[in-house]
Image (tube, helix red, strand yellow):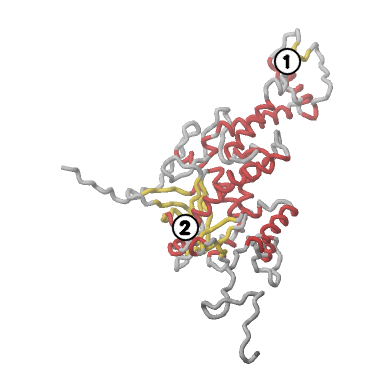
Amino acid sequence: MARPRIEPTLSFPERQKDIGTSTQPSLGMFAAFGGYPASTGVPVTPFTALQSATVYGCVNRLAQDIAKLPLGIRRKLPKGAGYVPDETHPLMRLLRQPNGWQTPYQFWRYMVTSLQLRGNAYAAIVRNRGGQPIELIPIGPDRMTLQVSPRGLVFYQFTHPLIGEGVRWFSENVLHFKSMCVDGGYIGVSPIAYAQDVMGVSIAAQRQAAILFRQGNQSGGVLSTEKPLSPEVTTQWANEIAKHYSGVENSSKPMVLAGGFKYERMSITPDEAQFLESRRFSVEEICRIFGVPPHKVQHLEGATFSNLENQEQAYINDALQPIATEIEQEAGLKLFFDDEIADGTELAMDFRALLRGDAKSRFESYSIATQTGIYSVNEARAFEGMAPIEGGDVHRFPLNTGVDEPSPPPTGAPGDSAPSPTEAPPISSEDA
C-alpha cells in the first residue's frame, strides 16, 4: 500500500540574526557581503572590491551604459507585422519617474551596480488600488530575504522605511534581477563571492604599488656597525632613518650616517618580481569575469583602430544585451497585466544610442534606409531629434524593384478583333 503524501503546512519562521565569524561566515554574511577572504589575506566584499580600479571601471561602465539606454513600451502588430511604440501607455509615467528621489538613469544605474556586485538587484513594486504600478522602491540585497513555501510559491521579506519592517510580499510585487544562478534559479551568484581571489590579487597588487611609492621605491635596507648596540639605540636609529629617508619626497636625498654606520640597500625591481605583469593579467582576468573588453576600462594593450569597432560590437552583444534582456523580461512580466502580455505588449531598450557612429556613417545609413523604404524621411529625422516635415511619412521604393502590373484587357465586345493597322476599314454603302 502506497504511503499517503502529507503536505507540510505553510509556515515562515522569523528571520534569525546569524552574523557568524570572520573566518567562518554564515550564509547571511555571505549574501550580505558577497564573499570570503581571499587567499591573499585581503578581505573581499562588494565594497572593498571597488578599490580595484578594474572592478570599479567594469561595474561603472556596465551600469552607465545600461542606464543611459531609453526604456520604452512597444506593442506587437497582428500577424507578425512588427512592433509600434506605445507612448500613451500608463506605465510610461513610471518609467520616466520610478520613485520620488531617483531619475530613471539613477534608478537603473543603481540596479545594474547591485546586480554586478551582489549578483542580485531588488525593487519593490508599489501599486494603486487598481493594481497599476505607481512606484519602484529599490531594496538593498542585505535587506531582502527570499523564501520558498512547501508548495513552491516564492515570497520576499524585506524592510524599508517607506513600506514597513519585516513585510512579506508575493514575488509578483518584487522586481528581482539575477545574475548566473546555481540553486534552481532563485538567487543570483555574486561574481565578487566566487572570484574573490582574482579581486584580492588586484587589490593586493595595488596596495603593494602604493607601499612602494610610500617607501620611495625601496624595499628596504640594512644598517650595520661593528659597535655593539642596545635594543633602545637600535630602535632609535631605525626610526630616524625611516623618518628622514623614507617616502617619495625623500627618495632622492643623500643619506648621511654617523657613528660608523653603513647602509646596504636591499631591493628588488618590479620586473624581477613580475609585478607589472601580474597587474596587467589581473586587469584581463577581471574584465573576463564581467564580460567587458579591456579597452572599456582604458586598458589599450593590444588594441588597434581596426579591431576596436569589432570589440565595441562584441561588448554590446555579449555584455550589455544579456543585462538588457534580463531587465526587459523580468520588468515586463511583473509590471504588465496578463492581457497586455498576451497582446504582445513588452518593454524594450533602445540600443540605437550606442550604435549611432559618426555623422557620416549615420547619414549614409539613413540615405540607404529611406531609398529602400525601410525608413521614411520623418522616421530618420526623429532618430536625430528633428521635427517632421510635410510629406515625410511616405515610404519610397526604387521603381526597378516594384511589382509589374498586368496590362489592361482590350476594350470592345468579346470575340471582336481589332483591325490590322495596315488593313483599311470596310467601306459602307453610304460612303459609296
Quarter of the picture containing the N terminus is top left
Query: How many residues crowd mark 2 within 10 Å: few (<14), some (14–19), many (20+)?
Result: some
Q: Answer left or right for 269 relative to 82.
A: right
- Out of 198 and 257, give the one closest to the viewer: 198
* Mark 2, secondary structure of its residue: helix
- Rendering coords of residue 412 (x, y %): 56, 80
- Rendering coords of residue 173 (x, y %): 45, 57
Residue extending farthest to the bottom is 430
Q: Which residue is mark 2?
A: 334
- Rendering coords of residue 161 (x, y %): 51, 56
Q: Answer left or right for 399 relative to 174.
A: right
C-alpha span from label 1 to label 2 = 68 Å
Query: How many residues crowd mark 1 within 10 Å: few (<14), some (14–19), many (20+)?
Result: few
- Out of 345 and 157, give the one closest to the viewer: 345
Q: Is residue 252 visible?
A: yes
Q: Which residue is mark 1?
A: 222
